[in-house]
Image (tube, helix red, strand yellow):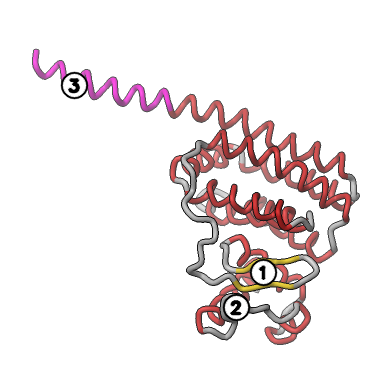
Amino acid sequence: MKEKQLYQAVAEKILRRIEQGVYPPGSRLPGERDLAQEFGVSRITIRGAEIALQSRGLIEIRTGSGVYVLGASLDRQGDLPEVNALEVTEARVLFECEAVALAAARGVDETTLAHLQNQIEIMQRSGPGAEKESDQADREFHLAIAAASENAAVLHVIERLWKMRTELDPVREVYDAVCLRSAEVRAGEHVEILDALRARDPVGARTAMRKHFRRLLNTMLETTEEMALAELRRKSNENRQRFLMSV
């Protein structure tokens, strides 16, 4: 089984145990080594499964403490605000650029680096029709970096921003359109970010992340303009048909 499929399969097994009450909300999961032995997989696979579950809001990885179950039905963040894609992205720039610099300065362990590499490979392999898979890899890449900052407050804010990015329909629609246009470029930008993390270069990591967001914002502005023009044309056509029918 491919590494991607393997960590996802392990994540589903852990999720089933959460749902069955084996790991109730508030409880701490067994350590990576114990889970690796239990499921017969590597610790890299366990780390990938945990990051995947954290990105879905089911568990929380607390640096120096362990991994804790939040519960599938818990929504600790309440209702989401009414924001647009540009506002979400601007906020991501503020937090994620500093988070990656912090992660680089503190050093990212080999297990997390391997997981980040795996997410890039998923993005590189994903072609037309596999956008959902690529987007999930993108999300896990960014949240893994946030976790590697070893700052729980920073991680919480970035998780919240990603919740807006994926669950607010108007925001998600813009991101989907943007990512569809620039999948290959996006993967290349993630390689530059990972290279800086491997080199433990905070300045380089911040610069690479800013480059990624600068391109994203430019493409997003172009996309939103095109979407607005398309909507304007649609309304104009509706009005044309409506009024010409009366002539």
Mark 2 closeness class: few <14, some 14–19, many ≥20 residues within 10 Å: many
Q: How many numbered tags mark residues here? A: 3
Residue kind at label 3, given as amino acid type: Gln
Q: CA distance from mark 2 to mark 1?
A: 9 Å
Does residue 242 show up magenta in the picture?
yes
The answer to whether residue 131 is left or right of residue 90 is: left
Q: Is residue 204 above or below residue 47?
A: above
Q: Are marks 2 and 1 in contact (CB under 8 Å)?
A: yes
Residue that mark 3 sits on: 241
Residue at 62% of width from left, 43% of height from top? 183
- Magenta span: 228-247
**Secondary element at tag 1:** helix
Q: Residues within 10 Å of mark 1 (few under 14, many from 20)?
A: many
Q: Which residue is mark 2?
A: 14
Magenta span: chief secondary structure = helix
* Front position in the image: 66 or 229: 66
Direction from residue 36 to residue 105 in the image, left or right:
right
Q: CA distance from mark 3 to mark 2?
A: 56 Å
SS at mark 3 in the image = helix
The residue labelled by disc 1 is 50
The amino acid at mark 1 is: Glu
Earlier in the chain: of badge 2 and badge 1, it is 2
In the figure, is residue 239 to the left or right of 116? Answer: left
Q: Nearer the viewer, residue 195 or 169?
A: 169
Are there few (<14), some (14-19), or many (20+) residues within 10 Å of tag 3?
Answer: few
The three-letter amino acid code for the residue at tag 2 is Ile
Residue 53 place in picture, x, y as percent: 61, 67
